[in-house]
Structure formats: structure tokens, C-alpha cells
Amino acid sequence: EQMKIIEVVEITQSLIEQLIFVWEKSVKATHLFLSDNEVEEIKKYIPQALNGIAHLIIAENESSRPVAFMGIEEQKLEMLFIAPEERGKGLGRKLLQYGIENYSVNELAVNEQNPLAKGFYEHMGFHVYKRTDHDEQGNPYPLLYMKLKIHRTGYGRTSRFRLWTSQGILA
């Protein structure tokens, strides 16, 4: 399967609609702690969030439809959403590595109640350095703040792959 990673230069209304579709499917599959009403409420702010992000990067499938996207602000991963039917194919890893290599992404926040995402980021070399009881909107959903771990020691002894995933090409 050929996936294309594309940096969005101009956000069109039709792209926003496609990304909202991906976002909603992704959130309903992973954020099981949110009610349908809460999802609908958050959904209203997605166009604004997409328009406001410094770097919006999408992954398109072979039919040129967006199936995943991430947003980066400075060196922080602000969003990463993958259509549920595309999960487990290495797409999240590809996108995040792209962000680490091209934008020096080294920080993110994840919902504590989304253990799959937390596990994925840990696998990618991030570790929790801070926890809050509420999310950034003040809702009672704990957030875990994670930073990219950089192993400066044991440089020569670590396999190329480990270094690659934990540091984003030896950053």
C-alpha cells in the first residue's frame, strides 16, 4: 500500500471536511471516555484548530484520500489522528518520525485515558514528565505531558534502529 505524506500548504473547505471525518472516526475508536455529546462539542472547534496550526501534515492513501494527519506547533506535536481502519500499519510511526526529523518534534500531551496512544509514544522514545488532572480546556480528563528521551550514552552499543526511533535520526 502506497501512502503519501504531504505538507498542507493551503487548507481548503473540502480538506477540512475530510480531516474532520478522520478525526471523528479516530476519536470514537480511541477516546472511549468521551460521550457522543462531548465529541460533537469538540468537533465544532476542529476547523479553527486546523486553520491555526503552524504545520499540518497529512497522509493520503492510494486513492488520494486523507487517512491520517498531524499538527505541529514549534517542536510540539499538537495532534495526531489516524483513521481506525488504517491503524497498525506503521502510519503513526511514519508521521511522527517525519515530524521528529523535519520539525524536531520533542514534546506532546496525551490523554491518560488513551493508553494505546501513550504506549505508542513510549515505544517511539517519549517519556512522561508531568501529569495534570484536567485537560487544557479544564475538563476532568488527565493529561500526560511527554518529552523525547535522548540517549547520549551507550551511543555505539545501541542498535541503529533503537537510536533511530528514540532520537529521530540521531538528532
Image: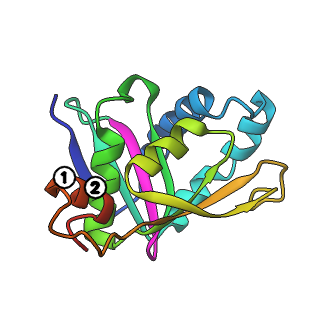
Asked if 36 appears above or below 140 in the picture, the reply is above
Which quadrant is the C terminus positioned in? bottom left
Asked if 43 appears above or below 146 in the picture, the reply is above
Callout 1: few (<14), some (14-19), or many (20+) C-alpha neighbours within 10 Å?
Answer: few
Confirm or deny contact between disc 2 and disc 1 (CB under 8 A).
yes
Task: Look at the image and say whether residue 27 sits in the magenta stretch.
Answer: no
> Residue at the spot x=44%, y=65% of the render?
72
> Residue at the spot x=17%, y=62% of the render?
157
The answer to which quarter of the image holds residue 92 is top left
Q: How many marks?
A: 2
Is residue 38 shown to the viewer in this render? Answer: yes
Q: Regarding mark 2 in the picture, which secondary structure is present there?
A: helix
Can you give x and y, in whole percent of width and height, for residue 164 in the image? 22, 59
Tell me the residue that label 1 is attached to.
161
- Foreground: 161 or 138? 161
Q: Regarding mark 1 in the picture, which secondary structure is present there?
A: helix
The answer to which quarter of the image holds residue 49 is bottom right
Q: Looking at the magenta stretch, what is its main secondary structure?
A: strand
- Foreground: 55 or 110? 110
Task: Look at the image and say whether residue 75 sits in the magenta stretch.
Answer: yes
Say what amino acid the circle numbered 2 marks.
Thr
Colour mapping: rainbow
Tell me the residue that label 2 is attached to.
165
Say what amino acid the circle numbered 1 marks.
Phe
- Foreground: 168 or 7? 168
> Residue at the spot x=62%, y=39% of the render?
114
Can you give x and y, in whole percent of width and height, for residue 21 in the image? 51, 34
Question: In the shown orientation, is residue 76 left or right of residue 62?
Answer: right
Which quadrant is the N terminus positioned in? top left
Give the residues in magenta. 66-76
Can you give x and y, in whole percent of width and height, for residue 65 in the image? 31, 35
